[in-house]
Image (cartoon, grey):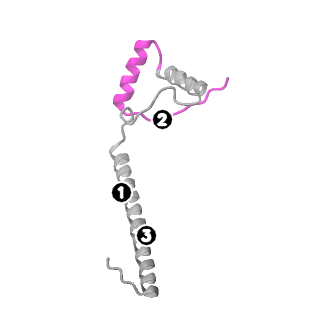
């Protein structure tokens, strides 16, 4: 079967730790990744639960996540204010038509 070369980067500490563990298991890192790839294909997904604790974000990713949350909050706030303005305008129109007074 033809082979495909896959290249990616790991931080030095993680790569060193993986090399050591693979060596203790009698595997090369390439063999370990091939086992992982076969397991992913067989199970049609990651063969274990991945949590945020186990997959920490980089500082840049964390800043992006926080900014995205802030932008989302601003969007919700803007929609809420817009809704309040529409309701106030609606009541003012009714006030003008029916002669009652609403104080906000």
Q: CA distance from mark 1 to mark 3?
A: 20 Å
Q: CA distance from mark 2 to mark 3?
A: 48 Å
Residue at (47, 18) in percent of width and height: 28
Residue 61 in the image: x percent, y percent?
A: 38, 46
Query: Hey, which quadrant is residue 13 in on the image?
Result: top left
Q: In front here: 86 or 66?
A: 86
Mark 3 lies on a secondary structure that is helix
Asked if labels 1 and 2 touch by Cβ distance under 8 angstroms, the answer is no
Residue 70 in the image: x percent, y percent?
A: 35, 57
Q: CA distance from mark 2 to mark 1?
A: 32 Å
Residue at (43, 13) in percent of width and height: 25
Q: Earlier in the sequence, mark 2 or mark 1?
A: 2
Magenta residue check for 68: no
Q: Which residues are magenta?
A: 1-28
Q: Badge 1: few (under 14), some or many (20 or more) residues near its Cα, within 10 Å?
A: few
Q: In front here: 97 or 34?
A: 97
**Quarter of the picture holding the C terminus:** bottom left
Residue behind mark 1 = 70
Asked if labels 3 and 2 touch by Cβ distance under 8 angstroms, the answer is no
Which dot marks residue 83? Answer: 3
Name the residue at the right extreme.
1
Work out whether 54 lies above or below 26: below
Query: Hey, which quadrant is residue 101 in on the image?
Result: bottom left
Residue behind mark 2 = 8
Magenta residue check for 20: yes
Which of the two marks, 2 or 3, is nearer to us in this view? 3
Q: Earlier in the sequence, mark 2 or mark 3?
A: 2
Mark 2 lies on a secondary structure that is loop
């Amino acid at each position: 079967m033809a082979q495909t070369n896959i290249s990616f980067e790991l931080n030095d500490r993680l790569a060193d730790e993986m090399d050591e563990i693979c060596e203790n298991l009698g595997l090369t890192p390439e063999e370990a990744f091939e086992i992982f790839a076969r397991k992913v294909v067989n199970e049609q997904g990651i063969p274990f639960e991945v949590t945020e604790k186990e997959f920490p974000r980089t500082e840049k990713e964390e800043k992006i996540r926080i900014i995205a949350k802030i932008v989302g909050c601003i969007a919700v706030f803007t929609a809420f204010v817009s809704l309040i303005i529409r309701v106030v305008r609606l009541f003012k129109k009714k006030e003008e038509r029916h002669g009652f007074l609403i104080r906000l």
